[in-house]
Image (cartoon, rainbow, N blue to C red):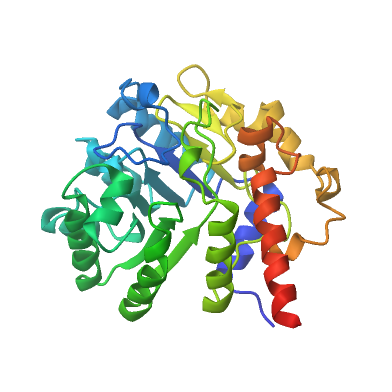
Amino acid sequence: MKEAPGDVIVQKAFEKHIPLYAHIELTYRCNLRCVHCFIPEGLRNSGEELSTEQVFDVIDQLADAGTLKLTLSGGEPLFRQDFFAIAEYARNRNMGLGIISNGTLIDEAVVKRFKQLHFKDIAISLYGLTPPTHEAVTRVPGSLSKTVRAIKLLKENGFKVTIKTPVLKQNLSEVPEIEECCRNLNLSFEPTPLITFDLARTGKNLHCRLSDEELKAYLRWENKAGIEIATLKRLCNAGICAVSISPKGEVFPCVALRINAGNLTGADFTRIWADSPVLKKLRTMRFEEFKECPECRLLELCSRCPGNSFLEQDDMLAPSREVCKVARVRKEIRDEKAI
């Protein structure tokens, strides 16, 4: 079978270490106060972020290095007054655009600009279908109606929308209803029970993780509903053909893998991308180097992510205990089904 052009491009970028995919976190600021947020409050309120001109410079450097797809996120990226100036600049450098947003700032005018700039991938965070559930997570009254408005507007205007739903104690009971709603509206649905450590590694945001009993109940439903499991079939693209830039200009292999490879306020992207020891390690790393994972019988059920391992264990090669637990429970449920 002949490979699709897109597959060939990605493979070439992987082989030649071209940063085809870039992710810029424009800000840590946000208008919601979600209970599971991985951004510590001090960082969220610091206001430290690249200026408009600095972001333009980053985009120029990424474009010159070969980036074709740019995802903009935060915090809440639309919180920045210069969001559309940045998006337009990226489009003028021939980048395809995506955004990850909570949706509360998306209205008719924003959707019109999305259409003008040909945004392709739009991901919206949705935590429940009723205000008590959704707003128990966001801790902002009225936020659900604004997010639902955004989803409707985007759908009416023909956008491809992905709904991202972390599965928490606060919203576990409504996850099946969210999935049904997405199915009926032809929206992509990405739920996950894996809650990431906060960036300060205090674990203060982990109180909303599911208990063992709740996790088993969710995974039973996941199995019955046929939810696709994202598994690591090979080494991921982080630092190889994908890169992430923080609001402060830090260069990370991926938005999830927060190992600092350098800072664009003090060095050129080309130099960091070519010379960073962190990135060089990722490009030579073999799956066999992962601790415990290569021989594990749960690989096909494991949503392993080096970023989770690094934040949890301070070692991207170590197994994440939370990820391991989820894989074990998935296996138990499949074994029960087979009996």
Q: Is residue 122 above or below residue 76?
A: below
Quarter location, residue 3: bottom right
Relative placement, left or right, of 89 versus 333 is left
Residue at the location (68% across, 61% down)? 329
Residue 305 visible in the current orientation: no
Q: Outermost residue toward the front?
A: 213
In the rendered image, which quarter contains the N terminus? bottom right
User: Where's residue 21, x and y in %?
Assistant: 52, 49
User: Where's residue 79, x and y in %?
Assistant: 23, 38
Residue at the location (25% across, 54% down)? 132
Q: How many marks?
A: 0
Name the one closer to the observer, 122 or 120: 122
Quarter location, residue 139: top left
Residue at the location (26% across, 49% down)? 135
Residue at the location (37% across, 62% down)? 163
Q: Outermost residue toward the left?
A: 109
Relative placement, left or right, of 306 versus 35 is right
Quarter location, residue 309: top right
In the rendered image, which quarter contains the C terminus? bottom right
Name the one closer to the observer, 282 or 165: 165
Name the one closer to the observer, 14 or 323: 323
User: Where's residue 273, x and y in %?
Assistant: 61, 33
Q: Is residue 101 above or below residue 197?
A: below
Name the one closer to the observer, 272 or 228: 228
